[in-house]
Amino acid sequence: MTTEAALTTAPLVDGTTAARVAFVGAGPGDPGLLTVRARDYLAAADVVLLDTLHRADEVRPWTREDVEFVVAGPQTEGGKPLTEAARAKLLVKTATRFSSPAHLVVRLMDGDPSAFSGLAAEAMACRESSVAFEIVPGVSTAWSVPAYAGVPLTAHERSGALHMLTAGDPATDWSLSVHDDITVVLLGSGADLKDGLDALRAAGRSAESPVALTEHGTTVTQHTSVLTLAEAITALENGTCGAPEATVAVVGPQVELRAELSWYETKPLFGWSILVPRTKDQAGPMTDRIAAYGATSSVVPTISVEPPRTPQQMDRAVRGLVTGRYEWIGFTSVNAVKAVREKFEALGLDARAFSGLKLAAVGGATADALREWGLEPDLVPDGEQSARGLLEAWPPYDDVLDPIDRVFLPRADIATETLVAGLRDLGWEVDDITAYRTVRAAPPPAPVREAIKSGVFDAVCFTSSSTVRNLVGIAGKPHPTTVVACIGPATAKTAEEHGLKVDVVASEASAIALVDALALHAQMLADQAQKAGEPVLRPSQKRASGRRSRARR
């Protein structure tokens, strides 16, 4: 039984005529910090009750398509937050809409629900209304945000004291936290955070104590400002703070370690905005890799993949594959693998039909697509992962060793002839079959087109020649300051033919390798700027200075 099934069929509570409630910690903001248990509950939820609607987008990948989201926060922009009592009432009302604990309501709470939240009031309301509930701890904001800021809360094992306080709590005795060897983590925002720091100084904490103020912690828009206690109070009061939306303040000597231990905000692509001209169903691994480097991505589909206009060629080729017409099948893209797999499924075939055939893949991503199908490619080029590289690795036809001289090559309708001509020169007969068509997508919205042309994006990652041609066709050329990264030499050549200066070419034809190459390039630019004593700026921050300023991060 899977975990999700176990949650769905959990033992019912006698006499309960409402949905079960699970108080689930959502972590501090980074969706990757959701616990495995939290994802299991989200997958089983009928309703997710959350404090802000933006959280819905973060957790939607782990919920069912028919899940209902209910916001337990301000109902209008700028509206007043609900009181604890009002949130508790809404939770009970939502749970009692159902007549059985076979249903599940997930109450998603920031950080760890057991700390600095309204858990107690809401759980008591459930108990008083005979609504069964569970608590799923989460990653605490108080611990994780300082960690992401590069500020350890203690220097050594069993050393110092750690106080975690809520700004704006009138019961706080600030005099207990004034000694220099005490690290204080203060949670709050705006005036409450400023007042809390002011109260700490007034109680006797040194005005020179180092303070780290962090906003949007654990997200790709995180920013940390390091000041003295006196400077932090003044900056928050005057609106001059480098992190004006800070919600976490760390006070203590450990803050000084940030200069050496900052790891998140110093990622190679941190803060970059990267354009990904790719179909959305293919962009997932690439956007995940981009996020891992600290950047945000915007997927703009430039092509859509459609079946061939006349499917008879593919039908005949697949039937020939089954009857032993071919010695080799050459896959030049993930889309080609997908097209053949879909044709197999339509004809009632499976991977066993490849028995006795040799499989070639143009690169790592295509090889992985075959492996997901249960097939291990016989040939993947070690060097350049392109049609040219595949051709260089392909063995010539040998009339003694090769019982059949024919190759099945399922490709796009606009593929180049390099591979076909080269295979024929090696003595092979080639059935060059259109397995799918690439069609230019509709232009993106006007604001996106303007962002592309004005240099709002720091980089663009082209994964094929067609993405270059189609992006330029539907949206115009990227701004000269935008870093241009290409998946291989053929794509780079197409970009140059369209008047773009190519900055990065991946070492292998895979989306992951492309992002890695871009990150390496960004790190090189940052290192160069630091050695020259210049600020490390993103390309979009330098666009006013012209194309030559692209060598800044």
Image: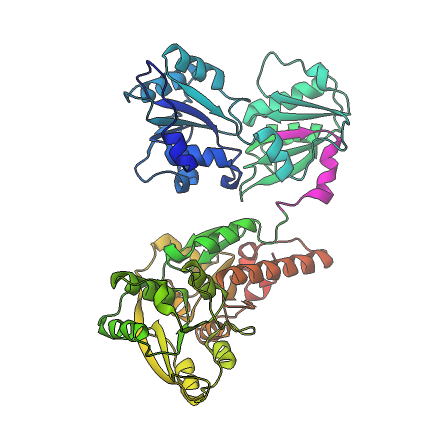
Q: Is residue 210 left or right of residue 12?
A: right
- Residue at point 32% right, 79% down? 325
In front of the other: 353 or 309: 353
Number of disc labels: 0
Q: Residue 262 colored magenta?
A: yes
Answer yes or no: is residue 308 visible.
yes
Please identify the quarter of the rendering in which residue 242 is found: top right
Please identify the quarter of the rendering in which residue 86 is found: top left
Answer yes or no: is residue 480 visible.
no
In front of the other: 227 or 25: 25
Residue 53, position as x, y percentages in the image: 39, 33
The vertical placement of 364 against 203, above or below, is below
Please identify the quarter of the rendering in which residue 22 is found: top left
* Coloration of the structure image: rainbow
Residue 35, position as x, y percentages in the image: 51, 35
- Residue at point 51% right, 79% down? 393
Residue 26, position as x, y percentages in the image: 48, 32
Q: Residue 253 colored magenta?
A: yes
In front of the other: 37 or 180: 37
The vertical placement of 419 against 359, above or below, is below
What segment carries the magenta color?
249-265
